[in-house]
Amino acid sequence: MQNKIKAVFFDRDGTLIHEKPGTYLSDPDKVKLYAPVPAALTKLHKAGFVFFIVSNQSGIGRGYFTEKEVNAVHARLQKLLPVPVQEIVFCPHSPDQKCACRKPGTLLGERLIKKYDIDVSRSFMVGDKKADVLFGHGLGLKSVLMTTANGKNHLKKYPDLKPDFVAKDMLCAARYIIKEDKKHA
Ligand SMILES: [Mg+2]
Ligand SMILES: [Zn+2]
């Protein structure tokens, strides 16, 4: 019997919710899920995955909005999702603060893996940027790159980037994850 949990770590902007390029989301009323997300997460939830969101919110460090506003966005996001997210964590720093928690830094993921006794060999990272792929690989997770927002550009821009799977929408990502997971059964 294995008691470790299997998890899917999600990026937030451009992965679960729409991202307007060059803008920072701080208004809960502007949170909009990508259409396939509820059905895809329901599938993954039924397959036994526990969910986490790991997000870079440098808008805090840049002084554009506060942690309180980010928490309001997250409350709204959880309300819109049909399944529970175990924990939402974020890096509040700007890149020039050179912290360890901004993706692709793995600190936030390491903490969650320890806290929840997550089985990395059965867990996944899903995001739309190079930093998300590297974050996943840095933790020993399989990385899915979404082409929803920045993914297409990042694939072109970084030819050495090797996500384990490229998904055009969250249902494709969910199907891949469930198929991979069955190899462990
Ligand atoms: Mg993103
Ligand atoms: Zn940080």
Image (cartoon, rainbow, N blue to C red):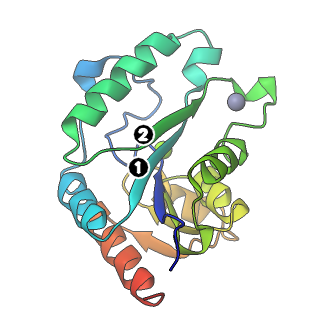
The mark found on residue 149 in the picture is 1
- Residue, x 66% and y 62% (percent of image)? 158
Location of residue 64 in the rendering, given as x and y in whole percent from the top left corner: 53, 11
Regarding mark 1 in the picture, which secondary structure is present there? loop
Q: Judge left or right: residue 108 versus residue 66.
A: right
Location of residue 40 in the rendering, given as x and y in whole percent from the top left corner: 24, 62
Q: Nearer the viewer, residue 86 or 142?
A: 86
Look at the numbered discs 2 and 1 and tell me whether their residues touch, using CB distance below 8 Å.
Answer: yes
Q: Judge left or right: residue 96 versus residue 124.
A: right
Location of residue 135 in the rendering, given as x and y in whole percent from the top left corner: 66, 55
Q: Ligand 1 closer than 8 Å to the CB at disc 1? A: yes
Q: Ligand 1 closer than 8 Å to the CB at disc 2? A: yes
Q: Which residue is mark 2?
A: 13
Q: Nearer the viewer, residue 20 or 9?
A: 9
Quarter of the image with the C terminus in it: bottom left
- Residue, x 44% and y 20% (percent of image)? 70
The mark found on residue 58 in the picture is none
Q: Earlier in the sequence, mark 2 or mark 1?
A: 2
Number of marks present in the image shown: 2
At label 1, counting other C-alpha atoms closer than 10 Å, the crowd grade (few under 14, some 14-19, many 20 or more) is many
Front label number (2 vs 1): 2
- Residue 31 visible? The answer is no
Quadrant for residue 59, please give it. Answer: top right
Q: Disc 2 residue type?
A: Asp
Q: Judge left or right: residue 54 versus residue 111.
A: left
Q: Disc 1 residue type?
A: Ala
